[in-house]
Each structure stands twice: as structure tokens, then as C-alpha cells.
Amino acid sequence: MPTQTRPFDSALVLDTPEAIEEYLTDAFESDDGAVIAQALGVVARAKGMSALAE
């Protein structure tokens, strides 16, 4: 019987401002626009779009 797995959602572990800061810092250090866009989307999901907009 194969093992059941689920995709990892990094938004679930971004639960502190420090974790978000480190995550975004790593993304910006990559100098890759796609990585940065992905990271911003993950942070938006982690914080909720309403909180991010404020």
C-alpha cells in the first residue's frame, strides 16, 4: 500500500514576524523574480490578504 502524502504549504509555518522576515530575506537574496513573487504569495496566504493590505 503506497504512503499517502500531502503537498507542503510553507504558509502554515510562517506564524511569526521573524519567520516571515527570514523567508522574504531568503527570497530577495535569490535575485529571482519568480522566487520573490512566490514568496510574496505565500506570505499573503499566511497573513491573510486583509491583514497584508493594512
Image: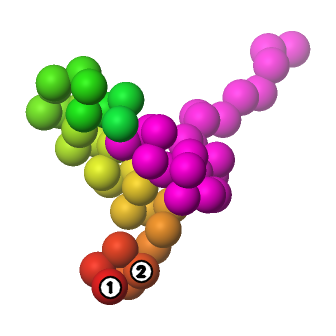
Image position, residue 28 (x, y; %): 24, 33
Q: Secondary structure at mark 1?
A: loop
Disc number for residue 54:
1
- Between residue 29 and residue 34, name the one nearer to us: 29
Q: Is residue 27 visible?
A: yes
Image position, residue 54 (x, y; %): 32, 85
Side of 3 where 23 appears, left or right? left
Q: Which residue is mark 2?
A: 51
Image position, residue 40 (x, y; %): 30, 51
Bounds of the magenta segment: 1-24
* Contact? badges 1 and 2 (CB < 8 Å): yes
Above or below, 3 against 46 in this view is: above
User: In the rendered view of the protein, which quadrant contains the N terminus?
Assistant: top right
Q: Amino acid at mark 2?
A: Ala
Side of 30 where 50 appears, left or right? right
Q: Secondary structure at mark 2?
A: helix
Q: Was residue 16 drawn as part of the magenta stretch in this picture?
A: yes
